[in-house]
Image (cartoon, rainbow, N blue to C red):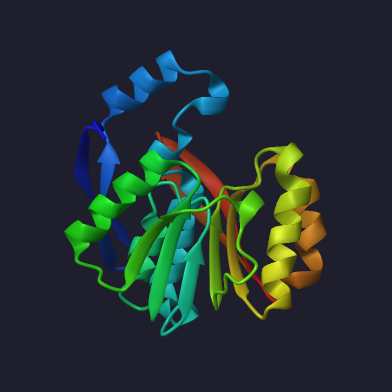
Amino acid sequence: MNIPFSIQTFHFAGRSVQAYIPTIKWVQQQFEKKEAAAAPYWAQVWPAAKALCEVIAAEPELVKDKTVLELAAGLGLPSLLAAPFAKNIIASDHIEEAVYVMKQSVAHNKEINMQCRVLDWNKLDKKLHADVLLLSDINYDPKDFEQLYKVLTAFLQQGTSILLSTPQRLMAKQFMEWLLPFKKKEYIIEVKHNSEIIIVSVWILKQ
């Protein structure tokens, strides 16, 4: 795949992680060429991913020695940060280009316990299991809420702990209210993004 990228270093709670990030020029070109539905939103590190990284960096015991799965991972920054602590980890996205870039980051970081896979939350194998599920900024489209709720509750019923990171958007309110019965802990993280401070909630969900 012809995706130009550069390596960037991110720092969270005294820990650091490196990841390949597509160049700004390439991302802008893709947005200009494609319709909004196909635009490469995966190719940027969003505030919710940074907030999730802050929580994992501060409390690595959340993923330590656990089987971890990240859905809709985009560039997979939370998975890359969690990999040194986890037993094994799968970072996934339904977009092949995103998985390709994540694989370059895994190779660069020499994370032998981390895999990258193409997975669509609408078509998950029922045998797929994880001790911990990572999700960041996935509840932005109301038409996905019902299916996403089914996915999350199916994992919760298996005993999976879920770390869900979301900006405090009005459109996400209904979805988060559905998850209130499972909320065990909440972190409020301030993330600087494009000269703005974005408030992000990170919830720990359990059955």
Establish if 140 lies above or below 131.
above
Q: Residue at x 54, y 74 (%)?
A: 132
For the N terminus, the image quarter is top left
* Quadrant of res 90: bottom left
* Left or right of 57, for residue 182: right
Closer-to-camera residue (101/167): 101
* Residue ID at (74%, 66%): 153
Taking depth in this image into account, of 51 and 102 the one nearest to the observer is 102
Q: Report x, y in % for residue 163.
A: 57, 66
Seen in the picture, residue 119 relative to 83 is either above or below; the reply is: above
Could you say which is closer to the camera, residue 181 or residue 141? 141
Query: What residue is drawn where x is 41% and y is 77%?
Result: 60
Q: Position of residue 26 (x, y in %)?
A: 29, 25
Q: Name which residue lies at 55% across and 67% down.
A: 133
Quarter of the picture containing the C terminus is bottom right
Query: 129 left or right of 193?
Result: right
Report whether residue 141 is seen: yes
Snapshot quadrant of residue 5: top left
| Rendered location of residue 104, percent (x, y) | 24, 51
Q: Is residue 123 left or right of residue 87?
A: right
On the question of residue 184 being in view, the answer is: no
| Relative to 125, residue 58 above or below | below
User: Could you tell me how many numbered marks the image carries?
Assistant: 0
Residue 19 location, x and y as percent?
Answer: 26, 51
